[in-house]
Image (cartoon, rainbow, N blue to C red):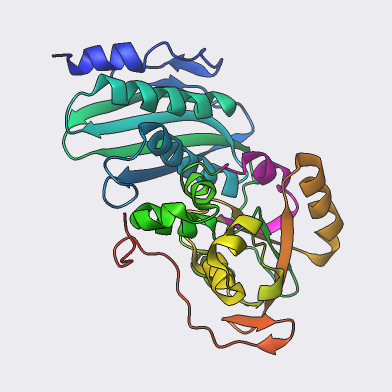
Amino acid sequence: MTSEFGLIERYFVGRQPSRPDVVLAAGDDCALVEVPAGYQVAISTDSVVAGTHFLANADPAAIAHKALASNLSDLAAMGATPAWVSLALTLPNVDEAWLSRFCDAFFALADQHQLQLIGGDTTKGPLAITLTVQGLVPVGQALRRSGASVGDGIYVTGSLGEAKAGLDVILHPDQHRETEAQTLVDAHYFSEPRVAIGQALRGLASAAIDISDGLIADLGHILERSQCGAKINISQLPISASLAQFLRERSRALQYALTSGEEYELCFTAAADHDTAVMAIAQSLSVPITRIGEITQTGQIELHDDGAALDWQLTGFDHFKDENNE
């Protein structure tokens, strides 16, 4: 049987070139890194657990991408540049074919963002992955949730609702025959963290958050920290053709866009006079950015459809309550 240290040596050590700011990575009790002058370290930890975030028999490549993308999305929401990551991997047994696919996908995404694995742990138990990512951001330039002001525009990147629809397909195998089903499953597992957009928004966005619990819930966090309200025009919500074709009903697709968790798109606010600059970022990075509303004084989220008020009672995604947990 392969030992813990054998697994680490075989699958995790020496897979990446060393960043110049990494003094010591795997092989000692702690990693050592150097922080450049004039920068702060942004740190985030997230776990993905079998039965909560993915089915135990899910493709290990999909699990690896989802786990790392969710952490990278946190860095994106702060405007940070990815630097280092630690991985704690809990496995029910040693399955080297599973590990090989997991690691190939993990390092492919890490290398895409110049993110170096600098340490971690492996242990036996129910399948779970915990990651701690660290990124660099110039002092005083980190994006936060607390800066939104009345009159600011509310924006989102990409399209919304596909992750929830993909989860529907995963949990209900009969839906695999539906048009666009596989596209939505891929959207659920293989999100693209908006790291470059987060960095580009430094100095432009007044507040930002990544959409992990649903637009309604996560925008609510901005409103709470910024002590303001919001008005959203649902007709402006970015809905993909795949989602519209899969759900076949406009109101249902729009509600998915408002409540879908694990999207890992960015929601941010910016002053009205920054709108042109925001749209220039979308064009230069070839990522859609849509203005969906504006910040108000009301202290709550008001929904309307091109001026017609809506009374939709919607909440976000909660892993402790949502009955759609995988």
Q: Quadrant of residue 129?
A: top left
Is residue 27 among the parts visible in the rendering?
no
Q: Quadrant of the N terminus?
A: top left
Residue 174 at x, y percent in the picture: 37, 57
Q: Which residues are magenta?
A: 192-209
Residue 290 is drawn in which quadrant?
A: bottom right
Q: Quadrant of the C terminus?
A: bottom left
Residue extending furthest toward the front: 177
Is 7 rendered above or below residue 285?
Answer: above
- Residue at the spot 41% in from the left edge and 40% down from the top edge: 67
Picture coordinates of residue 147, whole percent (x, y)? 64, 63
Residue at x-position 84% and y-position 48%: 280
Look at the image and say whether residue 314 sits in the magenta stretch. no
Note whether residue 135 is visible: yes
Q: Is residue 142 left or right of residue 18?
A: right
Above or below 278: residue 149: below
Could you say where residue 72 lies in the image, as x and y percent from the top left? 51, 40
- Residue ID at (32%, 27%): 120
201 or 8: nearer the viewer: 8
Is 194 part of what is drawn in magenta? Answer: yes
